[in-house]
Amino acid sequence: MRLTLSRPPTDTAPAPLPERPRLAPDVRVHEPVEAGAPWLVQSGGQRYLRVAAGMARLLRLADGTRDTEDMARELGDPWTVELVSEGLLRAQRTQLLDDAERKPTKNRRITFVPPLTVQFTLVHPERLLSGFRPLTARLAHRGWAAAAAVLAAAGLLCLVVQAQATMSALAEPIPMSALIALIVITYCGTMLHEFSHGLVLSHYGGRPSRMGFMLFYLTPAFFCDVSDGWRLPKNHQRVRVALAGIAAQAVIAGLAGVGSLMVAVTGGSPALRDFLLLLTVTNYVSGLFNAIPFIKLDGYLALMSHLDISHLRDRSITDARRFVARLLFGGRYERALPDVEWAPLFGLACMLFPVYVLSMAFTLWGSILESTGLVGAVIVSVVIGYLMLRVYAGAFKLNTEARTAGAPAWRRVTVSLAAAAAVAAVMWGVSVPYTVTGGFVAEQGRTVFVSTGTTDRSAIEPGAQVRLLSGGVVLQKQLGTAAVTTTGFGDLSVPISAFVPVKGLDSVRVPASGIALDGGRLAPGTTGQAVVSAGERRLGDWLYLKYLAPFWR
C-alpha cells in the first residue's frame, strides 16, 4: 500500500510572481469532507498538502483573472496585498502555481520511489472498486470482524497443535509443483491484500488511484496507491485502510491453518498438509512483517494515521540524527517533532531495523544464494553495496547536521577520524568464523561435496569438518557430519536439488565440481546443503571473501 502526504520542497529558489497567478493544471483544492476535517490541496495523482482554510480560499482565487490587489479585496480583513503575495510565494515554492517551464505531473506507468522501489502501474481501479461498495457495506459489521478474528486465532492454534509437522515442513525440501503453487497463491494473496486497502478506502468514499506491480527493495510485490485516504475526515478510517491488507492475510492464514488440521485429522495427503502449513506460516509472517512500524509498510501507515502526524518516520529519523550529532559533535539543534518525546528513539529504530531485516534475510537465504553461483553472488553484493552506500549517506547527513548546528570543526574532524579508526580496527582486529557453502549428494555409496564456480575452494582443506543440512524452504536441520578427505575437485553433474530446496527433480542435473567426503552416510539420493568450516578470518577479509571475491573466481 502507498499513502503519501507530501511536505513542500524548501530548496527551490522562488521566481517572480506572475501578474495574475493561476494554479497549475494538475492542482485541485479539496473542501473538508465534513466539519473539522482539513482542507487538502492535491498536486498530481499522489501528492497531498494540508492547508489552512484561509490559504485554501486564496488558492481558489488564483484562477488567472485576478491580481494580488483583487485577491486581497475579495478575501477581506485581515488579508493585505503583502499577505496575499507571501501566500502565493509559498504556493509557488511548493509548485502549486502554473509555470510555463514546468510540465504538469503525469500519471506515469513506471514510477521510482526513493530509496529503492520501482512501481509499474497496471490499472486505475476507482471504477472497479466502487462497484464493490454494496458488498463492503454489508461486510463492514462487527459480527464479520469478530468472525475474521476468530478464524485468524484458530489458524495460529492449528500451528501450535501441529508444531512438529510445521517445523518439518519448513525444514524439508518440497516438490517443484508445490513450490510454484506456493509462490502463485502467495502472490494472489498479496493481490488480495492490496485489493483490500482499495476496498476499504472506496467504502469510506475515497478514490484509489493506482494498482500494480513493484520491486520493493528488489523484492517483487504489488501495491495500491491510497494517498486519497488523507481526505478521509477521521483518523480511525485511515487506520482501517492501512490495516485492511493485514486483516486479509490473517484470514487467508487462518483458512489455510484450519485446512491443514482438517487434512491431518481426516488422514489426508501429508504433502497437502505440509503445503497448507507453509501457506499458513507465509501469510502470518508476511502480515506480522507488514505490521512493524519501523519501515514504510502498513503498520507504519496505521501509526502515522492514528497520530495524525505526516512524515512521522522521516521527521523521527531527523530527530534521531540530531540527537546523535549533539552527543558526538555538540551544537544547538531544533527538534523536527518537539511534541513527540519518543521521536528520537523511534527514529533510531527506523534507522537500525532495515539493517536487522537484511541480516535476517542473509541468515535465511545467503547460503542458498552463494550456492547458486555468480547470480547469487551478484544479488548479495548489490544489496551489501547498497547498504554501505546508505551508511555513507547517513554519516554525511550526520556531519552536515553538526556543521549547520554550529559544532566546532575540530570536534567534527576529531570524532570522524576516531570513528574511521575504530571501524578500521574492527575490520583488522576482529576475527569471525569463515565457512564455505555448497551442496552435497549421497549416491553410489558415498557423500560428495559439490560446488559452483564461485565457491572458495582454496579455503577447503583436508580434515575440515562439514555439516550436512536439509535444503528447507525456510529452515535447515542437520542430517549428519562429514570431513574433507582431499582437495582435488573433479567435474560431474548433480541433481538441481543439491542447490535449490526442491525434490522430485533428480532427472534435472546441472554441471558442478565435487570432492568426496568421509562420513555422513546418508540414504542414497539424499541431497541438501553442505557447510564447510574453514577456520577464522579477519572481518575485513571475511567481507571481501564473501561478497567481492566471488566475482573474480
Image: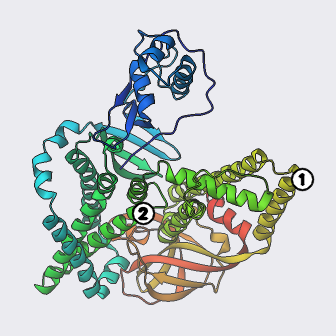
129 vs 244, left or right, is: left
**Three-letter amino acid code at disc 1?**
Trp
Residue holding disc 2: 510
Closest to the observer, 58 or 405: 58
Q: Compute the Cα span from label 1 to label 2.
A: 59 Å
Question: Where 340 sits versus 425, above or below?
Answer: above
Q: Identify the disc placed on residue 481.
A: none
The outermost residue toward the right is 410
Question: Where 377 sits versus 9, above or below?
Answer: below
Closer mark to the observer between disc 1 and disc 2: 1
Which residue is at 45% across, 54% downward? 296
Closest to the observer, 328 or 337: 337
Q: Quadrant of the C terminus?
A: bottom right
User: Callout 2: few (<14), some (14-19), or many (20+) C-alpha neighbours within 10 Å?
Assistant: some
Residue holding disc 1: 410
Q: Image quarter for residue 320?
A: bottom right
**Three-letter amino acid code at disc 2?**
Val
Res. 506 visible in picture: no
**Lower position in the chain sequence, tag 1 or tag 2:** 1
Which residue is at 87% across, 58% downward? 414
Position in image of residue 350 (x %, y %):
54, 60
Regarding mark 2 in the picture, which secondary structure is present there? strand
246 vs 517, left or right, is: left
